[in-house]
Image (cartoon, rainbow, N blue to C red):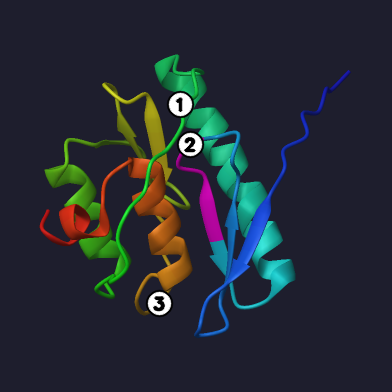
Amino acid sequence: MRTYQEFEIDYFQDEDGVFTALVPAIPGCVASGKTLRDAYRNAVDAIESCLEARRKVGALKFRKPRYAGLNLVPISHRELARKLKRAGYVEIRTRRHPVYYLAEGNLTIPVPQHPGDVPKGTLRAIVREMGISIEEFNNI
């Protein structure tokens, strides 16, 4: 018999109209979509990805995020992946949405691979989950 776990998903819509889905119970679990339905579907995939990655590294502890700053520089998913690697994250999942893991913070970050820049709301949520300021993120 399969068991299911329920997660609360917070939705935000940025100034470009893109929906961002944030799963507060799983640090770093963020997804986005052009519609609310797309954001939900991507959030379900992100939850599965994050849980799979955490099981793989044995990281099931959670932490409280901290966040500061206002001005994000738009970046592509490739640049986001490079910034995560420079910040000490290790890629632990490569199919679908790659997932990056930081052992010292026990944090997983899925990176959406959609055309164009990462939506601002998604990027803000990722920075918030990383626990650094936007200025620190822009300087990585």
Q: Is residue 111 left or right of residue 45?
A: left
Amino acid of disc 1: Arg
Front-most of 16 and 85?
Answer: 16
Front-most of 82 and 95?
Answer: 82
Residue contact at pointers 2 and 1, CB within 8 angstroms: yes
Which label belongs to residue 52?
none
Q: Estimate how packed mark 2 is, as few (under 14), some (14 to 19) or many (20 or more) residues with alpha carbons within 10 Å.
A: many
The residue pinned by badge 3 equals 115
Q: CA distance from mark 3 to mark 1?
A: 31 Å
Residue contact at pointers 3 and 1, CB within 8 angstroms: no
Mark nearest the camera among 3 and 1 is 1
Q: Is residue 122 visible?
A: yes
Residue contact at pointers 3 and 2, CB within 8 angstroms: no
Residue 27's place in the image compared with 86, above or below, is above
Q: Is residue 112 visible?
A: no
Amino acid of disc 3: Pro
Residue 107's place in the image compared with 129, above or below, is above
Which residues, given as a range, are shown in magenta? Answer: 27-31
Q: Is residue 122 left or right of residue 8?
A: left
The residue pinned by badge 2 equals 27
Mark 3 and mark 2 lie on one chain; the one further toward the N terminus is 2
Q: Residue at x 48, y 36 (%)?
A: 27
Mark 3 and mark 1 lie on one chain; the one further toward the N terminus is 1
Any magenta on residue 3?
Answer: no
Mark nearest the camera among 3 and 2 is 2
Residue 89: x and y in percent read: 24, 36
Front-most of 102 and 64?
Answer: 64
Residue 123's place in the image compared with 86, above or below, is below
Which label belongs to residue 63?
1
Q: Secondary structure at mark 1?
A: loop
Q: Secondary structure at mark 2?
A: loop
Residue 131: x and y in percent read: 33, 41
